[in-house]
Image (spheres, helix red, strand yellow):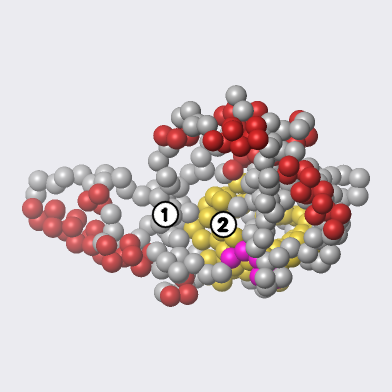
Amino acid sequence: MRKRFVANSTVAALVAIAWVGASLPVRGQTASQNPADKPPAKAAVKAADRPAEKAAAPIKRTPDGQPDIRGIWNKSGGNINEANPPKVSYTEDCQTFFARKAEPTGFNNLEPRPKPQHAPAKPPPQGIVDPPDRVLPWRPEAAAWRQDYMMKMGPPPHSLDHIELPARCAPPGPWQGGITRILQPPGAVVLFHENDHASRTIHLNGRPHLGPTIKLFMGDSIGRWEGNTLVVDTTNLNGKASYGSFGRPIPYYSDEVHVTERFTVKAGDWIDYEIVYDDPKLFTRSIRSVGYFFPADDGYELREETCVEGSYTLKNIFGF
């Protein structure tokens, strides 16, 4: 709310004192757009510190005793950031396409998103921690398939089956990152992702997994609370999307992948994240990756980020 100007000098002084003593807005509160209404510079700098370097926000509880993680969060890490992605030797036509100056599109005019208000000043480690060298334990036949697939992605692609998955609006899976709204209805934790409007339900009612013939993009997630840690077991993934936002590093995960996650609530404004990938068709052993959640900017609302199949990516896919 914009501050009203007050003619009476005494009232104005009292209003000024109240603003100086006010605390930072809580997560979800709409921040003022008036520069004069912003908190003091010292408080703003402190808000950017990593939670471990300041007083941790208390962990709130839902009526049934769970840590209250409702709100909008930034998720960082948990991805498969391998150390040695393969090199792709493009055809002469592809090299000519990439050498051409791309025509400007609406995306070129977008301003870069500023650093999130509550991002840690010193980000902790994120990404693969096991294997320690981040070299993925590929099965030989899977590595050969991957190299062949990447060569056929073009541009232009070898077939419709080789179009990169973001152009097909395929969600990457339960490891989706970015801005996420978390809800806690009775018996579940629900995640709404800003990217591609993907959503995911983690069931806490103790039911068994779905039958093996039912396959889903986000899989079937069963969770339980162990103290302040939400442990989630996910099966029934359909193998029709990738391990990341873009399919070139690992075009697809398999339909036998099994994922185990741990969301550990360390404070009211910090969640440690760990994910273990077991994909026996692609890898000879499991892969463990870590990350974290921190609050979105005060007053942030999820954007209407709709994916339209093809759209602006047609130039990059087919070269026209």
Q: Earlier in the sequence, mark 1 or mark 2?
A: 2
Residue kind at label 1, given as amino acid type: Lys
Q: Is residue 274 visible?
A: no
Q: Is residue 164 left or right of residue 24?
A: right
Position above or below: 52 against 184: below
Residue at point 68% right, 47% down? 88
Circle 1 is placed at which residue position? 115
Q: CA distance from mark 1 to mark 2?
A: 13 Å
At x 49%, y 58%, the residue is: 295
Magenta range is: 126-130
Q: Report the residue at 26% width, 62% height from top.
A: 40
Q: Secondary structure at mark 2?
A: strand
**Left or right relative to 213: residue 3:** left
Q: Closer to the camera: disc 1 or disc 2?
A: 1
Q: Nearer the viewer, residue 17 or 75?
A: 75
Residue for badge 2: 75
The image shows a total of numbered marks equal to 2
